[in-house]
Structures are given as C-alpha cells and as structure tokens.
Image (cartoon, rainbow, N blue to C red):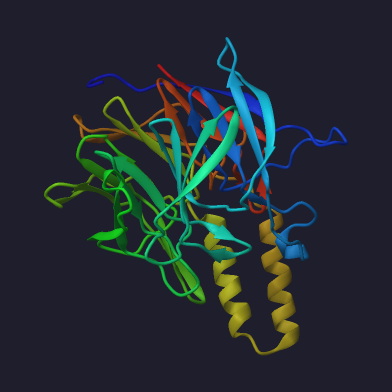
Amino acid sequence: MKDRNLEIEWNVAGKLPEGADNAAHIGVAGAVTGILSDMLVVAGGANFPKEMPWDGGTKAYSKEVYLYTKGQNNEFILSNTQSFEDSVAYAANVSFDNSIYSIGGERNGKATSDVYRYFIENKSFKRVQLPSLPLSLTNGAAVQVGGDLYFVGGENADLVSNKIYRLHLSAGGGEWEEFFEMPKPLTHMVVASDAKDNIYIIGGRKRNTNAKSDMYNEVYSINVDSKKVELLDTLPEALAAGTGGYANGNLIVIGGDNAQTFHRVEELIGAINLESDESKKAELITKKNDIQRAHSGFSPNVWYYNLEERTWKASNQIKGASPVTTTAIIHKNLIVIPSGEVRAGVRTDQILMGKIK
C-alpha cells in the first residue's frame, strides 16, 4: 500500500445482548475474543455492575460466552449464549487456525499463568489447557509467528515484565521459554506480527509505586530468527491500552490512553498513600474521585505506519465511544473491536467494526 493512504470506515456492527429486564448490557473489558470460522466470540471479561470503584463498587468477572454470526451487511447477529467455565479478564488473545489462544490475565484481581486454546466444536465453545507461563502475568500481549506463540510484557502484584516468552506449539507438550529481554518493562502496549519473522511492539506503559506511570511512544521491531532489534519511528503520541495489529503492510494503532487524566489520578493516589493526616487524605480522595467521574473518554485517533514508507499517518478517527483494554481482531479486510472500556470504570456494549478500504 505504498503511496496510498489507509482509510477505515467505522460503524457499530452489533451489541452485547440485553439483560432479562431489557436493559442494555453494561459491557466488559478484557474479554477473551476472536473470530472462529466467521463466528465472533466474546467470553468473560470484567465490569462494575453496581457502582464505580471510587464509590466502593466491586469488579465482577463475567461467566458468559456470546457467539455471533456475521450477516450479509457485515453486522454481527447473536447466535448463542453459553456459560463460560472460566472467569478470566485481561488475558492476551491471538487467533489463528480456527483457535483463540488466551494467555495469562487475571481472576478476582489476581494475575494468572494459565494458557488455553479455545475452539468451537458441535456449536459449543470449548477449551484445552496448554503449558502455563513461567509466572503469573496480566495486561501483556501475544502474537503468533511461524506456528510459535509469543507473550510480551505483562505485570503482577510484584513486577512489570520486560520478558518475551515463546511456546513452540508444534513441540507438543513443550514449555514456555524465555525468548528475549526487552529494552524496558511494558504493559498495555500494542503488539503485532507480519506473520513472517518480525514482532512489532508499540507504545505501552510501566507502573511506578506512588508515582506516575512511564508512558511510551517507542516502536520496536524484533526479528524472531536473528533477535535483531530495530527502533522504528516513534508514535505521534505516547499511548497505552489501545488496540491494533497488522494489515496489508501497515502497523495499525487504534485509540488508547494518552494518560492526561490517568496521570492526574496516579499522582493523587500517590499523595493519598503518603498522607498521614486523615482530613487531608479525605480531601485528596474526593478530588481523585471527581476527576475519575469526569473522565471524558479515550483517544479516537487511529494511526498507521507503512513499513515501506516508514512514516506514521492518521487514518479515520473512531466515531463515538473509543474502547481500550480490549482486542482488535483483524479478519480479512475488517477490524472488529468487541466491547471494552470507554471511560474510567465504564464499559460499552458496542461491537465496533472498521472496514479497511
């Protein structure tokens, strides 16, 4: 696609199903998702069904699977709802060979090392367990290159990882191995593969205790054969928690958090943790909660990087709610982004679709 702009036509192609009271679904973040034989799967994920976290709300983990078929106009039509035998959220998802590979994530607020392959058999969503990660990690990313799975970054209560782990799927019963040490620890980045021999790591962040997270705009290319690292042109803005992937020679980054609100909240959380005066602490908590309630949403920008031209350009912005902490599924000439978080603590029921022109 050299010397040609990448245009994406965005629309809402479906929604998560209404509840028994005909109320709109509140949505989920971090669902296990992918497309299997033209059927969209949205399973698990997390939300706040009663109150926002700053009002004392508790995060709930969904135990439902939604299966959608694609209509004649590329809309997604709910075909079936099943019980999810898991309750995982924020796992890294990658789909290929009619399977969804789900790596890490969290259950009830704790990171897990579990790895599963999900598939559809006799119209039912099923899974088999694969070798576990060397340690429990959530908020990482995954790609497939040459039949191998790669898991990048992630975090748990003790650390933010700078490792890339690899699993040889063809080995049959093999274990994850440490493949590479990244220049810095990372979570919430976009990771893509050209399906040949390169992994691309885009943006992301690293949390810091009682301080603002480090936000990144760096873009790295790692060759899986030589392990050669190349620093590509930086993103136009530092971003984390967005979605994206690879299509037609382009790296695509969709939405994301530029941390303008996030950093203000982090600074206040740090101040709250260090404040010993209870009245001052209460004032800081009120200020933090007010900022979170007033969250205006995430970036609607869509950036793409043509690997031949070596330059970042803007594509069509997302219209409406821009979701983060979800997965972009690039299937043929379509980008599908199910549900996700659209403001602090708030999810969306939309299934967003972008048609690549």
Can the viewer see residue 279 in this picture?
A: yes
- Whether residue 250 sits left or right of residue 343 in the image: it is left
Name the image quarter holding the N terminus.
top left
Say which quarter of the image contains residue 205. Answer: bottom left
Name the image quarter holding the C terminus.
top left
Measured from the top left, where is residue 304 in percent x and y? 34, 33
Q: How many marks?
A: 0
Q: Is residue 11 above or below residue 116?
A: above
Q: Is residue 54 above or below residue 240?
A: below
Can the viewer see residue 238 in this picture?
A: no
- Whether residue 44 sits left or right of residue 290 in the image: it is left
Q: Please tell me which residue lies in front, 327 or 43.
A: 43
Q: Please tell me which residue lies in front, 310 or 328.
A: 328
At horizontal 70% and vertical 89% (from top left) the residue drawn is: 277
- Whether residue 84 sits left or right of residue 316 in the image: it is right
Farthest residue to the bottom: give it.
276
Farthest residue to the right: give it.
21
At horizontal 60% and vertical 72% (from top left) the residue drawn is: 268
Farthest residue to the left: give it.
226
Measured from the top left, where is residue 260 in percent x and y? 52, 56
- Whether residue 70 sits left or right of residue 192 in the image: it is right
At horizontal 63% and vertical 78% (from top left) the residue drawn is: 272
Q: Is residue 169 above or below residue 350?
A: below
Measured from the top left, where is residue 280 in percent x and y? 71, 82
Q: Please tell me which residue lies in front, 83 or 245.
A: 83
Say which quarter of the image contains residue 213. Answer: bottom left
Measured from the top left, where is residue 320 in percent x and y? 62, 32
